[in-house]
Image (cartoon, rainbow, N blue to C red):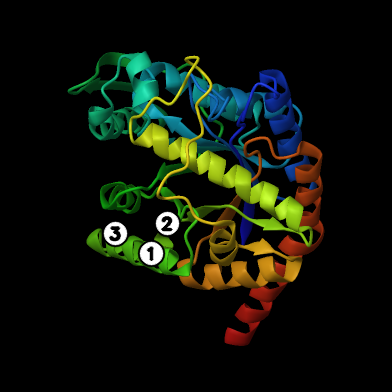
Amino acid sequence: MEFATFILAAQRGYHQSSDSVIRNSIEQAVLSEQAQFNTAWFAEHHFNNYSLVPSPLMMVAHCAGVTNTIRLGTGVCVLPLYQPQRLLSEIGFADVVSNGRLELGVGSGYQQFEFERFGVDVDEAPAVFSEYLDILLKGLNQQIFEHNGRYEKIPPTAISVRTLQKPTPPIWIAAGSARSMGRAYREGHNLFVTALHNGLETLRMLRESIEKAAASEAKNAAQARISLLRCCYASDNAAEINSYLDNARFQRRLSEALHQRRQQSQDGYLLQETPTQQDLSFETMRENLPIGSVNRVIDRLLEELDVLKPDQIAIQTQLGDFDHKTMLRQLELWGDKIIPAINKSLGQGRNGLN
């Protein structure tokens, strides 16, 4: 089983400076390598405090210089907000400076607030995403490529800085629909999925959707790697756990507001946190998620792995204004106890089957 950190780089209020949020995110990526995580993922968002990373590829390029072995991923590049021609060169550059450690996550995006400020129609995002991914695949696989589509017309073009990984870096699709899952299986890409703050039943439904998507392309579900984005936290300190849950719920409130196309901002930047009908109580979140004592987290994760059968768990770290030093200790705890225990249990399970 692979483990990853998903670093959102959020800013809950002006008591957090933007430079401290970014520097804390980088420090968490560095410690993720030391704690034996396989990958560090970086989000992409714009124009508000939900996430302060405007370019996950820039984070990859920087973190490539302060790490040595950990894979560095874009979680995700929002393709409709790019010129795919330029993005191709930046993908090549990031893979070169990271010595072939790039994991390329891509998605269509969902936040109208962002799209409006780029002059892009969010309702066309799925169609634009599909065409731009076509362009990326051409540019990554062909020395000279051209494209004649609905959104882009590109004459014969060469990309000067090409990826070290051949034919391409691993490509991950943020799979929020049967269509995106089907494309991943059809073209041999990987899946990035989430069950949000829901429990085992949602994971069962998600697994069924994955299996149906694979079957629709005459594939087996195991033919795509699956990464599950998950809120996880291990502690015997109730106040620590409640702080983590509070920040996780804060992030979810902002995500829902942006997804529902509401601009909740009094000053044009800092989004106003507003409770919603979708809010879950801390008690329900603790029941649904791998949260609690170390043993509780290990046991719950093993349950979830059995249901969803992912290849990677990506735990959310830099949420809201959760204390940075406490999160660093949490990452060390995962490296010392949780990751070894889960891999030992999975190894024993495989040996038992044999």
Task: For the C terminus, give its image quadrant.
Answer: bottom right
Residue appearing at x 55%, y 25% in the figure: 49
Alpha carbons under labels 2 and 1: distance apart: 6 Å
Residue 139 is drawn in which quadrant? top left
* Nearest the eye: 184 or 336: 336
In the picture of the structure, the residue carrying the numbered disc 2 is 224
Instruction: Please tell me whether mark 2 sits on a helix, a strand or a loop.
Output: loop
Vertically, is 130 above or below 90? below
Task: For the N terminus, give its image quadrant.
Answer: bottom right
Q: Earlier in the sequence, mark 3 or mark 2?
A: 3
Total number of numbered discs in the rendering = 3
Alpha carbons under labels 3 and 1: distance apart: 8 Å
Q: Does residue 158 appear anywhere in the picture? A: no
In the picture of the structure, the residue carrying the numbered disc 3 is 213
Q: Amino acid at mark 1?
A: Ala
Residue 294, position in %: x, y? Answer: 75, 66
Vertically, is 116 above or below 34? above
Vertically, is 59 above or below 156? below
Q: Amino acid at mark 2?
A: Ala
In the picture of the structure, the residue carrying the numbered disc 1 is 221
